[in-house]
Image: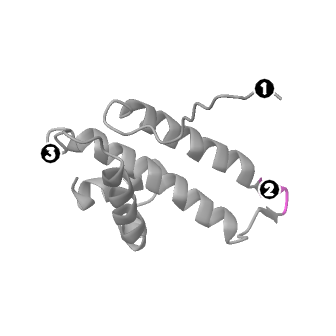
Amino acid sequence: MNIQEVLERFSIIAGLKTDQAAPWAALCSESIEEITSHVKEGIDTESNSRRLGAAAAALAFYKYALYRASSGGLESFKAGDVSVKSDTKASLQIAFAVWRDARSSVSDLLNDEEFVFERIGSV
């Protein structure tokens, strides 16, 4: 996965200009590492780099949304008759949906570490 491609895709998803996304390069790099750590053994990451990179960008976007929500930024603004309100909960739900969709699109390449099947014993 190429950090520049992931950063560019992240900027598109986040609605940021390239220079605005640059400070988030470390987040994109961490997301690449996280995705890479979950790739199944025997998968050719080079031939799947675009798909994996898209997932890394979506993961970076989800983390970006979490960080932005935790900063306690401006939630509403009013100037005269014009009022703008930001819905942090909705933004996080959208970011999670983007990440969930991207993760689903590479599910054949990643180890499934979220599903647990356990036996329930009788009491």
Main structural element of the magenta stretch: helix, strand or loop? strand
Whether residue 104 is situated above or below residue 35 in the rendered picture = above
> What colouring style does the render use?
one colour
Which amino acid type corresponds to the residue marked 1 in the rendered image?
Ser
- Packing grade of label 2 (10 A; few <14, some 14-19, many >=20) is few
Q: CA distance from mark 3 to mark 1?
A: 48 Å
Question: Can you see residue 87?
Answer: no
Report the number of numbered marks.
3
Q: Name the residue at 62% across, 32% down.
A: 118
Direction top: furthest residue: 122
Alpha carbons under labels 2 and 3: distance apart: 50 Å
Q: Nearer the viewer, mark 2 or mark 3?
A: 3
**Mark 1, secondary structure of its residue:** loop
Residue 95 relative to residue 91: left or right: left
Amino acid type, residue under disc 2 in the picture: Val
- Which residue in the protein does label 1 denote? 122
- Is 52 included in the stretch rendered in magenta? no
Question: Which residue reaches farthest front?
Answer: 123
Q: Which residue is mark 2?
A: 82
Give the residue number, with chain letter if any, for mark 3. Answer: 46
Q: Quadrant of the C terminus?
A: top right
Query: Which is nearer the eye, 120 or 62?
Result: 120
Marks 2 and 1 close (CB-CB < 8 Å):
no
Of 9 and 102, nearer the camera is: 102
Quick one: label 3 or label 1, which is nearer the N terminus? 3
